[in-house]
Amino acid sequence: MSTSFPGPMLSEATAGICFVLILLVPFAAIGLALISAGLGRSRSAAHSMMASLMAIAVAATVYFIFGFSWQGFAGGPFHALIIGGKSWNWIAAEPFFMRGLQFNGTTSSLVALLQIFSVGLAALIPLGAGSDRWRLGAICISSALLAGWTYPIFAHWIWSDGWLAQLGTNYGIGHGFVDAGGSSSIHVVGGLTALSTAWILGPRRGKYSAEGMPSAVPGHNAVLVILGCLLATIGWCGLNSAGAILFAHAEMGRSVLVVINTLLAGASAGMTAAAITQVRFGKPDGSLTVNGWIGGLVASSAACAFVKPAAALVIGIVAGALVTFAVEWFEFELKVDDPGGSISVHAAAGLWGILAVGLLGRFPVDPLFPGNLPGTDSGQWLAQLIGIATLFGFVLPVTYGLNFLLNRVYRQRVDIEGERQGMDLHELGADAYPDFVTHADEFMQR
Amino acid sequence: MKLAGFLLLLAGWALVLATPPLLGPGTERAAFVLAGVGIEIIGLVLVARAHLPVPEGRT
């Protein structure tokens, strides 16, 4: 067991600002929960919000009990393999129940706080893909698997001086894998779990005809979706800024750049999605515009501290276009039923965000940036590509395998009657909108 | 097909993992990483094809 270099100590003022920024992160969770509920059917709206609440609760609790033990923090104890004389830091060795931490504003305690919120955010992402057919009990267990294993192990590799972060110091590959705000560990990990969930659950009944053509199942409340998008933007500003300070060792002043980049990426992605849908369908599509916007925010997370605002605009434009076409591609070509667009928004846009660090990132050594990202600029794209390969080669098989095994012992999909009746009545015993007749079975093929 | 796809994902990652310690900086290292990613893409295609749903009404 060893310890690594902890990075610079935070001043009291920086720690205080960082604490406030972290308190903004729940807005991102509120936003994602509202989007997921709004894009689902009205008869599953209460279930969707309840599932969001439970996913956050289970994820935070499991992460507190043992998830943080595997993730740890830079400077904390870890286990390493020695390969070719180089240390490969692969897992942390923190005690369970966060017993090794002092909750007094130290960097490690702020990291733990941010991570409790972040793991909840990651657990929310698959809900959009499993909408209208994923049982509440299965959601809770799946969230526990994500928070206890998949998320903390990958997060350790990139944020706690793990082997991916050390590719720069060990092998001279750029500055090692860089992701300030969590495009990879939060969003791609969540997005790949969403993909696994959608595969395991299968499409909703009536979604695909006998010829394999998808039918439109519109979301039930556009207002919730757009409000969710606006709230999520606030949360992302906090998430990216706090991540830049804690994981990229950016000085507090750089938060201004981070917030501007985050907003520009989200806004340009939203405008791109609106423009594309206007050109293709004659009218801007609200749900795709929101998904595009969130995709821009997701893509901005990795590079937010390392790009100029003009580059953030480019990241957003590409993310907006990518999400718009990816949603269609998953639905029409791969026959993946993802009502909330979680896979396109979080996995596809997140992957682009990771790659954007290598293509557009600049790592200046300036007074605002104390140069704590060792290595050189050359080969950064290769470090990012190794991270992407790890997401597909490790995270996807692990998250799919865990959810596949779960499905064997505890069926994740609701029965046919439950799907017809709606998740609200079937699982919760009460509708979200009991005073209104809000739905008919026009989309169900009996 | 699904199992083969996941095995290819793991195999591609193993190739990528082995590259930094075995090869020094240069085009060879990049080529091996790209080859590993290529293998992963083939694995992804197989996994995705294995999950194409059977149309309703057909057995």
Image (cartoon, rainbow, N blue to C red):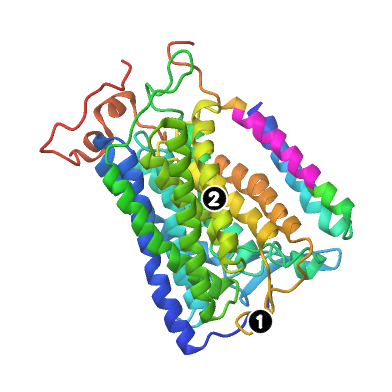
Residue A30 visible within the image:
yes
The type of residue carrying mark 1 is: Asp
Q: Which residue range is magenta in the image?
A: B34-48
Between label 2 and label 1, give the one nearer the viewer: 2
Using a 10 Å C-alpha cutoff, classify the residue at mark 2 as few (fewer than 14 neighbours), some (14 to 19) or many (20 or more).
many
Q: Judge from the rendering whether residue A293 lies leftward or rightward of residue A390; answer left or right.
A: left
Measured from the top left, where is residue A110 in percent x and y? 47, 76
The residue that appears at 68% across and 45% down in the rendered structure is A393
Q: Single out the residue that lies furthest toward the bottom.
A: A12
> Counting residues from the N terminus, which is met first, the one under dot 2 or under dot 1?
2
Q: Which one is in front, A57 or A288?
A: A288
Measure how far apart labels 2 and 1 are at the Cα level: 28 Å
Dominant secondary structure, magenta: helix
Residue A408 visible within the image:
no
State which chain disc 2 sits on.
A
Residue A317: image tag: 2
Q: On the rendered image, what quadrant is the N terminus of chain B found in?
A: top right
Q: Judge from the rendering whether residue A103 lies leftward or rightward of residue A368; answer left or right.
A: left
Using a 10 Å C-alpha cutoff, classify the residue at mark 1 as few (fewer than 14 neighbours), some (14 to 19) or many (20 or more).
few
Quarter holding residue B35: top right
Measured from the top left, where is residue A197 in percent x and y? 48, 38
Measured from the top left, where is residue A143 in percent x and y? 44, 50
Q: Single out the residue that lies furthest toward the left.
A: A435
The residue that appears at 42% across and 31% down in the rendered structure is A281
For mark 2, give the secondary structure.
helix
State which chain disc 1 sits on.
A
Q: Judge from the rendering whether residue A439 lies leftward or rightward of residue A48; answer left or right.
A: left
Q: Where is B34 relative to A255, above or below?
A: above
Q: Where is A249 relative to A164, above or below?
A: below
The residue that appears at 35% across and 38% down in the rendered structure is A135
Residue A366: image tag: 1
Quarter holding residue A206: top left
